[in-house]
Amino acid sequence: MAQSFRSQGHGELARIGVAVCHGFTGSPVSMRGWSEYLAEAGFAVNMPLLAGHGTTWQELNKTPWEHWYRDFEAAYLELAGRCDTVFVAGMSMGGALALRVAALHPVAGVAVVNPGLTFSDPKAKYAGLLKYVLKSVPAIGDDMKVQGVSEGAYARTPVAAVHQLSQLFEETIGLLPSVTAPTVVFRSTVDHVVPDSSLEVIKEKLGSSELRIVPLENSYHVATMDNDAPLIFSQSADFFRRNLHAI
């Protein structure tokens, strides 16, 4: 379902929150399994539907990146108001938004899956000009090794929104030295959407002294719905438990 997800948490982890963020042109569908796993484990979870998503690609074309960030930051702040400790998690663009929140707020840790900070398509750098002559390009969604599953992404990728995405990436890269919380990156060995340069930027600029890379050998970009999803779910939950007092 392309709706937001929220859980109160229960048991010994009820006061531990995880803000979860989906990716560009996608929806909470891609992150629902992860969110439900964490909720069932006891964590308080808040996963918003970002502005311009879950509607039409035309709507996304009119949405500034600051609105995506506003929605995810609000999810984090809601958890911070009711939890003792809050982590952030995200996939693809959601990874960039999670890192941005971590740079600006006292999160206990960051768990991201194939985080996007650079583009594989060299034409993306010209999106600011192309948006005046080209409204959309072919979709980037559903890059998964497993068959018969869909993340519910848009059928087209809006070019003006790609320009917004590039601005988000640039702004977030500049903030990476301020991310000092423990960080784990789940990285697919084959990803047709986000290039390896995104991970290289994180390795080079992240301010955290604790960065762990977990390779995903059997998944493509949308790994949270692919063959390695159980590994992501269990290892991220273990990571959160280990860093309950990281702040």
Image (cartoon, helix red, strand yellow):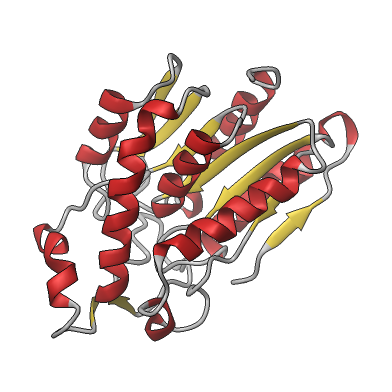
Give the quarter of the figure containing the C terminus: top right
Residue beneath the point at 41% across and 56% down? 146
Give the quarter of the figure containing the N terminus: bottom right
Q: Eyeballing the image, is 55 above or below 215? A: below
Residue 56 point in image, percent of width and height: 44, 84
Residue 5 point in image, percent of width and height: 70, 60
In-front residue for pair 20/227: 20
Residue beneath the point at 16% across and 62% down? 124
Furthest toward the right, the residue is 11
Residue 49 point in image, percent of width and height: 58, 66
Residue beneath the point at 89% across and 34% down? 11
Furthest toward the top, the residue is 209
Q: How many marks?
A: 0
The answer to which quarter of the image holds residue 108 is top right
Q: Eyeballing the image, is 63 above or below 29? A: below
Residue 238 point in image, percent of width and height: 63, 25
**In the displayed structure image, the side of residue 26 where residue 42 appears, left or right:** right
Task: Specify whether residue 181 is in view.
Answer: yes
Residue beneath the point at 70% across and 22% down? 244
**In the displayed structure image, the side of residue 12 where residue 195 appears, left or right:** left
In-front residue for pair 212/167: 167
The answer to which quarter of the image holds residue 147 is bottom left
Task: Specify whether residue 36 is in view.
Answer: no
In-front residue for pair 233/14: 14
The answer to which quarter of the image holds residue 58 is bottom left
